[in-house]
Each structure stands twice: as C-alpha cells, then as structure tokens.
Amino acid sequence: MGGLSVAGLRFFDADTYEQIGQPVDVPTSPHGLKEVTGLAYSPGGETLAFVTAFDETTPGYIRVIDSQTRELLAEARTFAPHVAFTEDGSLLVLTEYLEYGRIWITFRDSTTLIPVGSSIQPGEFGGAYADLYWASPFFALTPDGGSVVTASADGELAWWDLGSRKKTSALEIAEGYHALALSPDGLTAAVGIDGGIQLVDVRSGEVQTASGTLAGEPLWLLFSPDGKTVVSTGLDGAVTLWDAKTAAPRGTLWGHSASVGQPVFSPDGATLYTASDDGTVIAWDIDGYRGLRRPFTFTHDRTYDPVFDRLPGRFSPDGRLIAVGLKEEGIGLWDAPALNPAGSPLLETGGEVKALAFSPDGRTLAAVTSSGMATLWDVESRSLRRGPFEVDPLLAVGVSFSADGTMLATAGGNSVKLWDVATGAALGGIGDGSGAGDVAFSPTGSLVAFVREGWNPTTALFEGGGNAEIWDVARRSRIATLQVNAGAPDREYGLGYAIAFSPDGRMLAAAGDDPLVRLWDVRTGKLIREFEQNVGTAVWTLEFSPDGRILAISGEPVASLWNVATGTQMGPRLPGGSRKAMLDLSPDGRRLLITNGNGQGAVWDIDPESWAQRACALANRALTRDEWEKFLSGRPYEPACAT
C-alpha cells in the first residue's frame, strides 16, 4: 500500500498500518510541493509507476520504481496527471497535456518510458474546475486489455482499440466533466455527474442516473473487486458507496475533512483505502467483519412510510439471539455471534411488528404491531404461546415485561394497557386514554413509565404530547409527570418518543422530537441532565448499558453513545442502514444492535478496549487528548498506541 506525503511517497503494511522503510523521494512540483497526482502498480506488483504535479509551462515527472527495493528504474518528464498499466504490464497509459487546453491518451514502454505508437485524441476531452480544485479527465482500460474508454464533456462514452488507436464504439451520456470507472467484467461503466453518478450498460446503452446525493461531481470512481459496489470520492471529503445494479446510494463514509483522491480496494474487497488532502489515510472496513461494525440485512425493503417506518431489534437476555421485526408480518430470529438466521421466521404476528421484548428469563418473546395486535412466543420451541390478540384498536408501538416477568405493558393509540402473561387476561390500563409512544417497566420494582404522544382517539388528531408519566402499578396511581419536550412543534403525524429506566431503576431517560434527551431522578422527579441527542429530527429508542454508565440513543438514521456522568458523546455517530433506526444493547454491554427502516442493520462492538484499538489504528500513533475524548469520553487518558 502506498501513501502520499510532503516528505515523499510512503509505504505501509496493510495489516498493521505501520510504515515500511523510509519515504521515497518525490520531485518538488512547480508549486513547491512534493505532490503525486497518480500512481499504479504493475499487474504482478513488482513495480510502481507514479506521476507528479506540473503547471502550464513546467512538466512534472513519471517515475517507475521497484516495489520492494524502491530503486528507481526509469524516469521521464511529462504533463501527465493519471497513469495505468496495461493488462500484460508492457505499456503505461497516460493522460497527457500535449496541446494547450487538450488532453490526449498516450503510451510509453513500462521499462524504458519511451513513447510507443500514436496517441488517442478524444474530442472535448478536458478537465474542469471544482471550486479551486482542477480535476483532470479520466480513462479506463477494459478488463480484456484490448481497449481504452474515455468520457468526454460533450456527452460521449467512447471505446478505442488499443492496437489501432481508433474509435470502435460510443454511447451517449450526460454532458459535463466525468470521473470514470469500469466494472471488473467490463459490462458496466460508472461516470460522474453533478450531484451523483450514472451507470451505463455497455451492451444496451441503458443509463441509470442517481443525482442529488453529492455536493458536486465525484473526483474519482472505483468498482469493488466483486463489481457490486461503486465508490465515489469528493471535494468535501465524502466517500460514498453506491449499489452497482441500481445506482442507489448505500451510505457515505465521513472521516476526511478535505478533498479525497484516488481510492483503492484490497484484492478481497474487504477494505477500502482513501487518502485526503487533509493528510489522513483511512482503511475502511467495508464488509464489517474485521472492525467494529458488522452489517446485515434482515428483511426486504419497501417504500418509505413517514409514520410506521421502523423495525425493532432485541438481544435475548443471554445474548445468544437477536429478534428482529420483518416487513409486513413476522419476527426473524438470528444467531447473534454468527449473524445468521436461526431457524424459520415466526410469522403469525397479525401485522408488521413495531416493538419487541424478551421476558427477563428469556423464555418468552412479546411483539406488538402497527395494527394493535400482540403475540407471545415460546423462544425455545419457536411456537406461538398466545395471540394474536388485540391490545389497542388503533396501533401498538411499545411493549415491556415487568421485572418478575408476570405482567406485560403495551403502549399505543389508546395509552398503556396491562396484561397477565400467563393467561393473557387484561389487567386494565393506566393514563388518561391518550396515545403513548413508548412504555417501560422499572427493572427493580413495580413502577412503569410511558411517554404521552398526544394522540386523541376522539378527534383522531395529534394534539401535542411531550410528557412522561411514572405510575405505581400495584396502586394504579401516578407518582410523577415529567416534561419530555420543551415546546414540541405541531405535527401532522406522530414522531418518535422513547423512554428507558437505568438498570438500578433510579434514573429515567425520555425523549421526543426536540433536540434534547432528558434524564430524571425517579425518586425526586428532578431533572439530572440534558443530552444533545445528535441523531436527527426525533428519537426512536433509548437504552442504558448494564452498568448504567452509557446511554444509547437512536434516531434517523443513526445512533449515538453518551457518557451518563459527563453528558458527553462517545465517539462518532453509528449507522446501521437508512431511515428510522432502533437499537438495543447486549446483556454484557459490549455490543450495540441497530435496526433500520429499510431492513438493514448492524451490530457494533462498543467495548471500550475495541474503541481504543480502533482509534489508535485510525491515527497510527498515540492519540491526542482531544482524540481520546472523542472516542473514549470519560475514561482516563491512557493513549497506549504505537508511536
């Protein structure tokens, strides 16, 4: 793996991220910088070619070095921003400025750097300014090694025979500047456009366009080795992943603070390397199985629903299973360590599941649906124990077991209802009958808390919620009313409300659709702390870690972790998929489960030791106090990273 530095061209071990040897000298550019604009390994990896920066009057250099010894093998002066080896490694292909304002495709012997044959001269083949950044045009070599592909500003995608240097075919694309990449099988071309990308089917000419995602045109494009993903890099530091079949954006990786140039995949496609003008190089764990995040897809996607677009996920009390709500109907059970389905789905839920809860002993799983139905399942036998039975005539969005497992509370359009787990008998309700957005039993006693969502069944309107209530179930008496939202705005439909007791039952966290999450003392009703939730327009779930030190918050579409004692965020926001996110913490507090409305999810390793190792790996040096606080807020400063 190579990297760019003002001190020269550096090499790093791809496993340990440690620098290998001393930097290779890079000639100083006319701008006074040691700047590499493009590099390429030979097909066998024995040699490395790189080109350096130039200006209108002074050429830069092309150099070929031995990859192992770093010995200089050949050198020439050139006005070339990009370079690539042909499939057999005999030629170097370059984009060269041979006439003012025009760029040609030229060829050089990869051993001697002597020009070989005629050049290719595409029409309207020029660069463009992105703000103050000059972006040169791209070419791509077909996988069979027989052609060069160019994308011109006049909207032509052209194929040029490598032997004759003649144009053999062309397809129409959007006009303008284009980054360019070919899929590994050569059947799809990705071209950059303003705000997104186009995918072009090489055989049919069919074009799929995705726009409005990026801040401008991509600076670089790259296909993953399996051809399933396209990566774009941008001037704003964004690294965006796209589905190579549909052109749909899969997500954006934020870690750089300045423009990002040429991305590189590891041969197995598991790791993506990006380098930025801010001086950072990041190794992204794309498949998620070698880092903190393990992504998975637990159900199919569907059209966005602004009200009910949430799908829950819960760890079993022993941490061995994950239960997830499925699209339309059913519950999926997954093996938590392996992240594989564990048996057939539990389908007879009576509708789409919006909340799940395991009993404290882990033997029973409860689910409630958007149609107001509930089911109780025997976890070991995967059999339906009770239901579906109606718990609310409108909808149900919350469910919780009592500490002893004998009682179930459900929240929905008609407030909170209580149920006998053994018989399924109704035990009455609490509250005034208005809608409740979430409900939670205290883990240590007979208290239950819920958030009033403001739904009025009589008028069928949301009339402003924002209060949390704590009730003594045994006495059926309200002991506290707490304000969740400070002046919540009027809404056309209900947004998120979430509530959670700390493990010792002494604190209650609640949130709604304003920027704050509030934490109260249950005994006194006094406000302890407010958190800036930082997860979107509304909060959908809250969860304390088993030791009560961390509060996890989910919104749309990310989650965040907060130090309860200091009120500071721990590390960056954590994605799972897209749209509304729900979460759960594993019983040992070391894993965070995120499930999103699009049917995608992720299990994050949030063990502080893992965070420390990851933070050190990203920095490749001892962490500063600011970096330590970002990743490991609340822990003593002990930056035990390799220097």
Image (cartoon, grey):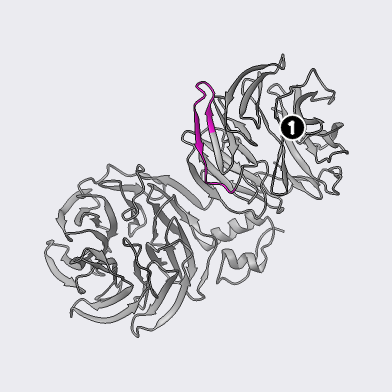
Height in image: 586 above or below 25?
A: below
Height in image: 605 above or below 70?
A: below
Element carrying mark 1:
strand
- Say if the magenta span includes residue 212: yes
Name the kind of residue labelled 1 in the image.
Val
Please state, as top left, top right, bottom left or bottom right, where the C terminus lies in the image: bottom right
Residue annotated with mark 1: 83
Across and down, in percent, residue 201 comes to: 51, 26
Q: Which quadrant would residue 111 be assigned to in this image?
A: top right
Q: Horizontally, is 159 left or right of 311 in the view?
A: right
Query: Which residue is pictured at 35% across the width and 83% down the height?
Result: 525
The residue range painted magenta reads 199-215
Residue situated furthest bottom in the rendering = 524
Q: Horizontally, is 340 left or right of 566 in the view?
A: left
Q: Horizontally, is 196 left or right of 377 in the view?
A: right
Q: Is residue 122 visible?
A: yes
Query: Which residue is pictured at 79% across the width and 45% down the height?
Result: 35
Residue situated furthest top in the rendering = 164
Across and down, in percent, residue 425 comes to: 11, 64
- Say if the magenta span includes residue 162: no
Across and down, in percent, residue 153 comes to: 65, 32
Q: In this orientation, which residue lies closer to the viewer: 377 or 537?
A: 537
Height in image: 76 above or below 481?
A: above
Q: Horizontally, is 406 left or right of 254 in the view?
A: left
Q: In this orientation, which residue lies closer to the viewer: 43 or 164?
A: 164
Q: In this orientation, which residue lies closer to the viewer: 299 or 597?
A: 597
